[in-house]
Amino acid sequence: MDTRYFSAPGRVEIGGNHTDHQHGRVLAAAINLETTAEVRANATDIVHIDDAAFGKDEIDLRYLEPVEEEKGKSAALVRGVAAWFNENGYPIGGFDAEISSNIPFGAGLSSSAAFEVLIGNIFNGLYGAGASSAGIAQAGQFAECEYFGKPSGLMDQTASSFGGLNVIDFLDPKNPVISPVSAKLNGFSICVTDTGGSHADLTPDYAAVPIEMGTVAAHFGRGYLSEVPEEEFRSSIAALRRYGDRAVLRAIHFFDENERVLKQAEALEKGDTERFLELIVESGRSSLAYLQNVFSPANPHNQGLTIALSLSERLLAGKGAWRVHGGGFAGTILAFVPDDLKGEYKTGIENVFGPGRCHFLNIREQGGGEALGNR
């Protein structure tokens, strides 16, 4: 069998912190770090994965139910993506894949979403499945939630699958509206800092965010906050406090952040760098004060994200922007750093968190798909 080559990028979340699971908007970009695969169809129902970082797996596609022992492992993602394809009428089949990645694992750059999107594109490429970019993203989210065992919105997979910089509106998650954004941020670089915090035992913290936002939505007979009229919500805050003040604050964050995404995109299109950076800082402060996902309340002694934000504020005040990145509670922050401060910023951050923690990134226009030639 001929060898085929596939790749899928990681992603960076620029705006829309914890809005996707409420069917809101995000501003996200694919990045120039990727997961790649050399693949050969094998004319069987068996997938063989040889991952440079995680070793070998064998997945029998004749059995597509979740496997308890696979939870938290790559095999669960392969089986879950295959199950989604099968349930939606797309053909699947076995293959042998050698996989490698330069996306740092656990650094908040969506290495898992890149892997899921990669697997979906392999089924598309080898077996003519014909799933759309949106469908591949949905397959990845399904695999992560139902098979891998981690609550997930749809942002990570969509950003990886489509590529570029986009506003993604999930009001109808089966048909997300993708609006490309032209970025005009000359003189600034994107930096994601991995603070090294462990994500172990954080699933209850992640799960509480959509649960609490959903409780507020349910008060109005709606499934998601994006379906609730904002003025109706704001006029009902006194009554909503019965569900807990944190639930109310997280809903406040949602409504503000959902609109802020549009303002960020507009500022980028206009080349209004100053306004864009102000909006990034606003987003970060909202996550800290209202969303409250900068550290785990169960472990207040570990606050690496808060330390990184404080360092960034000192290093970049008046010259850049900073905010929590992704799910939060541990992991990474995002910063926009003036090019003439990159060295100083990297040194200041890595003096605290260690060498190699500060990742400067570029936007990748190509989403997941088949690559040409030997990568």
Image (spheres, helix red, strand yellow):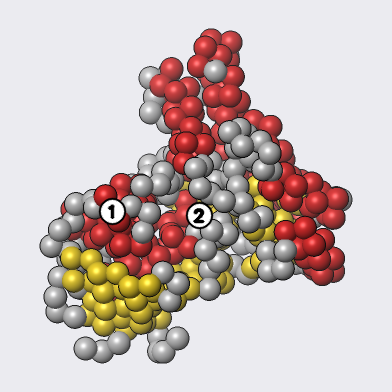
Residue 334, placed above or below residue 286: below
Count the marks: 2
Circle 2 sits on which residue? 179
- In this view of the protein, which residue sits in the foreground, 256 or 359? 359
Q: Residue at x 58, y 10 (%)?
A: 238
Q: Secondary structure at mark 2?
A: strand
Separation of marks 1 and 2 at Cα, in angstroms: 39 Å
Quadrant of the image for the C terminus?
bottom left
Circle 1 sits on which residue? 69
Q: Position of residue 32 (x, y in %)?
A: 56, 72
Q: Residue at x 46, y 41 (%)?
A: 203
Quadrant of the image for the N terminus?
bottom left
Residue 146 at least partly seen: yes
* Circle 2 Cα neighbour tier, 10 Å, few/some/many (<14 / 14–19 / ≥20): few
Question: Is 43 placed left or right of 368 in the picture?
Answer: left
Q: Residue at x 48, y 27 (%)?
A: 212
Q: Which mark is residue 138?
A: none
What amino acid type is highlighted by mark number 1? Glu
